[in-house]
Amino acid sequence: MKPEHNPSLKTTGFFHQIFRSIFPDPLIPKSDQERKRYLLKNLILHFRPPTVPEKTLKFSLTWGLGGMAAVLIFLQFGTGLLLKFVYVPTPLGAYKSILVLNNEVVFGQLIRNIHHWSANLLVLMVFLHMLRVFFTGAFHPPRQFTWIIGLGLFGLVLTANFTGYLLPYDQLAYWAVTVSTGMLEYVPAVGSRLQEIIRGGNEIGPATLNIFFAIHTAIVPVGLTILTAFHFWRIRKSNGLVIPRAPEEKIEEKPIRVPTLPNLLLREIVVALVLIAIVMVMSVSLDVPLGDSANPGLSPNPTKAPWYFSGPQELLLHLHPLFAVFIIPLVLAVVLMGIPYLKYDTHTEGIWFASLKGRRMALIAGLISLIATPIGILLDEYLINFLAGFNNFPAFLGNGLIPFILIFSGCIGFYILIKHRYSATNNEAVQTLFVLILVAFLILMITGIWFRGPGMKLTWPLKL
């Protein structure tokens, strides 16, 4: 005899399966408090593995940089959402809305300060995080593509800062974006068209503000959310963080693991709270400046790009625009993306600066670049430019192709020399060349920020 059909049985079975998927039989919590605690724990462990290698908990391995970048992104999202309630994305309304925000909205200036300082700190944290990954060898297999995702995140962070730079629409923002977008003109074939698309016309105006506002408040947040989640997922799929080890120590096949909760989570919460406290102190102590309303007919002197683009702007003063704006950045981008896929003698993951020899080589490269780059800037500023007036060399050759060939040949020669001089592995030699270029770029950036005065002439910071 068949049992009678009872719809409630199917319904009960359906919810029973859901309940069992949440609470497996051996782990069903008895009380409501235990059940909530259990759910919270499992939610956290979806973002982190249940256990982590004990050695990766050392603060000196990561310095918490990746986690701090994630916290700053959340701060950006939260404060940016609040700012949208007041901001008006039109040339006349933008500047007035910032005045209203600063002077009339309760805590408006503070919210803008938090948004500004966390944005600048985010550039710094992502940059330092990438350096940490490189110098601990955390780009070797199976983490190659994670490095590429990190480069994409860095590009999005720069895009977020650059598009947000124009939104106050004061003199500083207007002319900084004018200078930065003006560099696109030197990109071969598509430069003028690309500049016109980004500006929404030939000049900075209402269309530019709308484009920048849309990119800053819609496209970039979506991209950051997707890539950040993908980045964390890739880290977990790649067996988590690299395990720190001494140069002579072998990779542990079965490292000691400890529960994520509370060992990792507690450390991440402490780092996040300290970072938020620092941002709050900066935001309370330092108000974001707001200059006069944008005036297309009156440019400030000097007219500088945002600080994170000051390196390319400084390079533009020394080299032909085609090389400074297009060729050199393109070569560097290709090299950075290719770093994980080069052939290396050994895997140095978890070892700071690859080896003891690698540390010495990196220090030597840094010192060489620290001396050579300022000398090169001074020579170009006062000697080469002076001598250029006495020859008829085309600018493309004398100020472009020839210096580029010399720089490129110098980097290749330095790599070969350092590799043979110290009998270095590919890991050590690539790292040494990386440090040479990195220090040179930082000096160019510092020069552009603090040592360029009226007319973009070299000057001491106290005279600015």
Image (cartoon, helix red, strand yellow):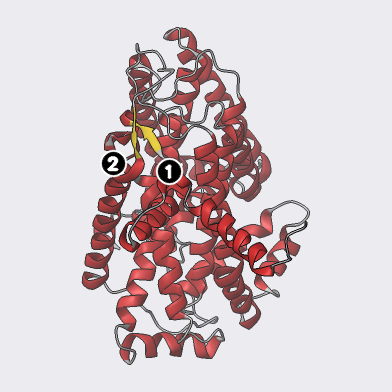
Pointer 2: what residue?
Answer: 263
| Quarter holding residue 98 | bottom left
Q: Quadrant of the N terminus?
A: bottom right
Query: Is residue 34 left or right of 394 when viewed as pictured?
Result: left
Point 65% across, 71% down: residue: 199
Work out whether 81 lies above or below 257: below
Work out whether 210 lies above or below 366: below
Pointer 1: what residue?
Answer: 26
Query: Is residue 318 left or right of 53 when viewed as pictured?
Result: right
Work out whether 156 lies above or below 359: below
- Judge the density around disc 1: few (<14), some (14-19), many (≥20) Cα neighbours within 10 Å: few
**Residue 393 place in picture, x, y as percent:** 66, 40
Q: Please say whether residue 389 is visible from this viewpoint.
A: no
The amino acid on which the numbered mark 2 sits, given as a three-letter code, is Asn
Q: Please say whether residue 33 is visible from this viewpoint.
A: yes
| Residue situated in front as seen by the camera: 401 or 277 | 277
**Residue 90 place in picture, x, y as percent:** 57, 86
